[in-house]
Amino acid sequence: MKNGHVVGGDGESLVYKGGFGCMKWCSTREKAKGKRQKAKRQRRLIVLENLFLELANSQASAEDGDSSSKRLVVALYEALNSGDSDAVVKIVAPDLEWWFHGPPSHQFLMRMLTGQGPHQSFRFVPLSIASFGSTVIVEGCDAPRNIAWVHAWTLTNGIITHVREYFNTALFVTRFDHSDDILPSGRFPSLWQSTLSSLVGKSVPCLVLAI
């Protein structure tokens, strides 16, 4: 190639034109960024593989299982917020059951999972997380947008198979499968209740989730 010359660039790459063609030179910075992103995805997938092994181990204690379930759900949020679809499909069942309560405009999660909206449209940042058997409850809040949310994830064999999503809703979680747990008042005990719904600055509906 003779008499070549640089004809344009954007600070990250340069286009080199010569007598027989055109070649794009990527800067070291651009290449390094791509390698870091690829390495990060690979590390996330390795972590997921380890979590799947922990959850599949039938000899694991209930406490260990709860910890692994919570870590898997946290890994899902990280994948959603970064747009890592490869990690998402490893965590979520292809026939995920989704139940939603809240304003239709707040269906950010489903739009992310189905690819109908960019992952930057909403960031799910867990502020509290609790596990009750196969159910993991996560709560978060986007105060500037007056949005409080709760997710109740159900895991089956190390995969998320069901999610109940609540936006700007006060949620109480109870269990009624053990009659001995009924209180003298006839009410079932509360396992968990949301605490961030009051931050949205308005009255919100209240629902009960029995697990």
Image: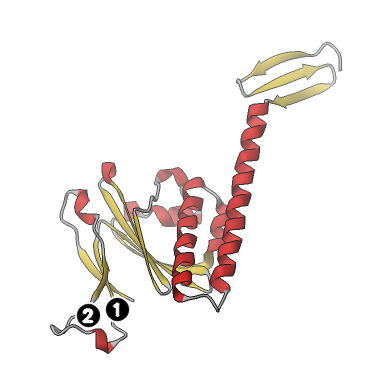
x, y percentage for residue 116?
47, 51
Instruction: Report if residue 118 is visible in the image.
Output: no
Q: Residue furthest top?
A: 3
**How many angstroms separate mark 1 from mark 2 (CA)?**
7 Å
Instruction: Say which quadrant the N terminus sits in.
Output: top right
Residue type of the residue flagged with mark 2: Phe
Measured along the vertical axis of the image, is residue 2 above or below residue 179? above
In the rendered view, would you say 97 is above or below 176? above
Question: Dividing the picture into quarters, in which one does residue 138 lie?
Answer: bottom left
Which type of secondary structure does the marked residue at label 2 adopt?
loop
Q: In the rendered view, does 138 fall on the left or right side of 199?
A: right
Which mark, residue 189?
none
Q: Residue at x 55, y 50 (%)?
A: 84
**Numbered circles on residues, count:** 2
- The scheme the figure's colours follow is secondary structure
Q: Are marks 1 and 2 in contact (CB under 8 Å)?
A: yes
The three-letter amino acid code for the residue at tag 1 is: Arg
Q: Residues within 10 Å of mark 1 (few under 14, many from 20)?
A: some
* Residue positioned most to the left: 185
Tag of residue 188? 2
35 in relation to 182, above or below? above
Is residue 178 or residue 202 the one in the foreground?
178
Pointer 1 residue: 175
Res 10 → quadrant: top right
